[in-house]
Amino acid sequence: MKIKKTAKKIWNFLVHDESLASFIADAIIIILLGRFVIYPILGLAFGTAFPVVAVVSSSMDHESLDFDAWWAENSEEYEEFEITKLEFESFYRKNGFNKGDIFVAKGVPFEELQVGDIAIYRIAEQRDPIIHRIVLIEEDTIQTKGDANPIQLHFEKSISEEQIQGKAIARIPYLGWLKVLLVETINLFR
């Protein structure tokens, strides 16, 4: 009887109480459930350790340019990889994406990756995964490039199969801003 009474008090506090303490408790429970229950289940379902990834940089932002204007400014960088305008127009997210977007990712075998896919991969010097476009596939590595970066970064030139966490399959705009703000706040204190 005492357990039932205590459970009812907890339920009322979490669900019906409108206090700041109840709000904070609810937020903590939601975060913990998301991180330790929902995220791992999504990881199993999508075959990747990173089933949902927030974009924390502007390296793929086309700055609201329409595709033709963006291509006119950036075509040389992709033509070096023998990527034509017509080919690029068929790529997933040909108009890039923005800081604060979230991507749902799917784990795929290395041999299924294609030029133009948005790859999610890890590098040793960074905690968060990188989300860039594949521009070249070699025998056992890929190369990527951030659409907004003027040049290919050093770590993009040889990405091994072990580094690849998956490829982006769906975009949810703006939902990642909570993580962006959190990361930027943490970085201020480092």
Image: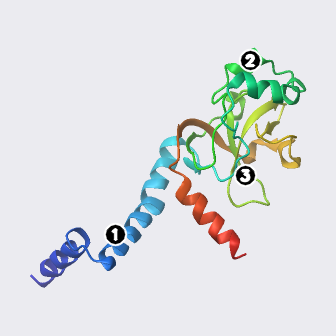
Q: Residue at x 80, y 38 (%)?
A: 145
Q: Foreground mark, 1 or 3? A: 1
Estimate the spatial distance between the alpha carbons at disc 2 and disc 1, rounded to whole Å.
Answer: 48 Å
Estimate the spatial distance between the alpha carbons at disc 1 and disc 3, rounded to whole Å.
Answer: 32 Å
The residue that mark 3 highlights is 122
Q: Residue 95 appears at what percent x and percent y?
A: 66, 30
> Which is nearer the eye, 102 or 46?
102
- For label 1, count other residues whose C-alpha is less than 10 Å away and answer few (under 14), some (14-19) or many (20+): some
> Which is nearer the eye, 87 or 32?
87
Q: Which comes before the other along the chain, label 1 or label 3?
A: 1
Using the image, determine if residue 134 lies above or below residue 72: below
Q: Residue 127 appears at what percent x and percent y?
A: 70, 61
The residue that mark 1 highlights is 26
Looking at the image, residue 6 sits to the left or right of residue 137; the answer is: left
Q: Which comes before the other along the chain, label 2 or label 1?
A: 1
Q: Which comes before the other along the chain, label 3 or label 2?
A: 2
Q: Residue 110's mark?
A: none
Using the image, determine if residue 121 lies above or below residue 62: below
Q: Residue 68 appears at what percent x and percent y?
A: 73, 21
The residue that mark 2 highlights is 87
User: On the image, which quarter does residue 23 sit in?
Assistant: bottom left
